[in-house]
Image (cartoon, rainbow, N blue to C red):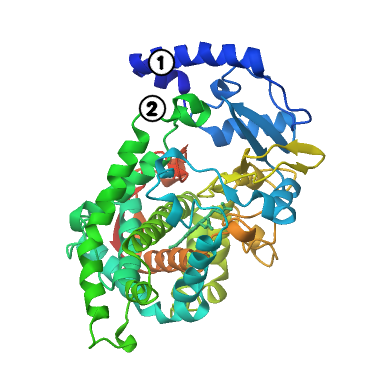
Amino acid sequence: MDLIALLKQNDVLFLLFTSAFFFLLLIKLTFSKSIKNLPPSPPTMPIIGNLHQIGNKPHISITNFAKEFGPLISLRLGSQLLVVASSPDTAMEILKVQDRSFSSRFVPSTFRQSSVLPYSLVWADCDQTWRNLRTVCRTELFSAKAMETHAWVRGEKISDMVEFLRNKQGEVVDVGELVFTTLFNTLSCIIFGKDFVDSKYEHETHGGLKDALENILEYGGKVDLGDFFPMIQRLDLQGIKKGGLKQIKIVYSCWEDMISKRRSQIGSSAWSSDQADSLLDRLIEQGFSDVQINQFVGELYIAGTDTTSSTVGWAIAELLKHKEALSKVESEVLKKDMNFDKISEELPYLHACIKETLRLHPTGPFLLPHRAQETCEVMGYTIPKDSQVFVNIWAIGRDPKIWDDPLSFKPERFLGSKIDFKGQNFEFTPFGSGRRMCPGLPLGLKSVELILASLVREFDWVLPNGDDPSKLDMNDKFGVTLQKEKPLKIVFKPKQK
Ligand code: HEM
């Protein structure tokens, strides 16, 4: 997010930016009318507003502003107004009390494409398309019944992961890659009825699908100057829209043959609905077009893989740093015959560790960007139509007014506590709340639990080069998801049983 650094790197951009700056300054001085009664704001610079104060760790800089200016603040990013809620009360106002007015999305430019938006679940307003897709998510993927139907897939992919690690004895493994691949294959089996990662499990995917998905996430996390200065938006000076679209097309091309083959089988007279054995089959049967399938499936991969793998990565890092917590999980996991379907009830300490991880390291520190559909009033302040709206769950999770000793990893705080992440406790909403709440919670949570429980049960975790786990670097890197700055690498040593 470092605007100055970005401009220094690119002379043409600098020239265009400064010309646009003075042109806009002229317009602003001529026409601007200030909106009254906005939430408090740090002092702004003409035209760029607060852009120069955000830096490359906006979750930290914006939390610091909230400490100084209060739980509802406004920031000006060029011509874009950003409103940030940083307390349970303001979060409840945005996500529950006035959910309807704030449930639209502010769409990053990578996804602001005419071939994407009309079919999107993640970026669409809450229109009929969005409602239909949420229904498909519920009935086909995340209802209790659908989760039960797919239990064997989850179990099989976990076994593949364990076998892969056994064969890797003594070698250093990138935890993010490992979990990403496991999730990726789980989703591929549910969606297409087959794995996409090759049999050696070495992270190579059919047609480069996994790389292209990762690239889309990378583009999605880039700061686009056009978002702040609409006059230069159409020029796509940083190539974000163009680059993002290229990757989106690569993703679609990876499964287009599969869709057309399946479509002709389903269209034939020999087809009966009993043969439908994947989400793809059901989507085709329900009349989804190829573009609708592409967009829906692509978004499931994008929303499901990175979030889950970063949560597992943070949980492993915290457990490595906190030996007592790790041994409590270990004795809990080893005591039981693992019943894959009842992990959260049977392993309360592991469940508390996952909650504690999500409190300290929520994958979306601001949730996904919301947008005010109309001008509304929150806590006596005016939020103008089309403001971008963040709920800073990173700040809320670390607020000493809410949590005792908030910066320490203490899973015990959740044992016997009624605080849950189902969207009713506004001090803890790592999956959001209200109509935009994460539909994939059941699969995300189950996957994190299964992967962690299996890794603890089957392996001892050792850092490469005998590094001391208590000194593990816990710095984060802001992007679409909040990742560890230094990827976590571990040697998994099979447990002697
Ligand atoms: C630990 C894992 C996960 C976490 C922490 C997580 C978190 C979130 C968050 C914070 C949001 C945004 C809520 C908002 O803007 O108010 C979201 C949205 C979403 N998530 Fe998840 N998620 C996880 C796993 C998954 C999985 C496994 C899937 C599907 C395979 C998924 C699919 C989605 C979709 C489609 C949306 C957009 C919903 C909409 O805009 O209506 N997520 N998730």
Structural distance between the alpha carbons of marks 1 and 2: 10 Å
Side (left or right) of 43 relative to 469: right
Q: Residue 16: which numbered mark, if any?
A: 1
Between 385 and 496, the one nearer to me in the picture: 385
Q: Secondary structure at mark 1?
A: helix
Residue 141: % across, % down: 45, 72
Mark 1 closeness class: few <14, some 14–19, many ≥20 residues within 10 Å: few
Q: Position of residue 14 (x, y in %)?
A: 40, 14
The image shows residue 230 at horizontal and vertical percentages of 50, 28
Q: Tell me if I can see residue 466 in this picture.
A: no
Q: Quadrant of the C terminus?
A: bottom left
Please give the name of the residue rendered at 26% of the width and 73% of the height, measured from the top-left corner.
263
Residue of label 2: 235
Rendered position, 439 above or below 10: below
Q: Secondary structure at mark 2?
A: loop
In the picture, residue 262 is in which quadrant? bottom left
Task: Report whether residue 159 is seen.
Answer: yes
Q: In percent of the image, x 21 and y 61: which residue is there? A: 201
| Residue 124 - label | none
Given contact means CB atoms under 8 Å apart, are the residues at marks 1 and 2 in contact? yes
The residue drawn where x is 61% and y is 44% is 371
User: Of tags 1 and 2, which is closer to the observer?
Assistant: 2
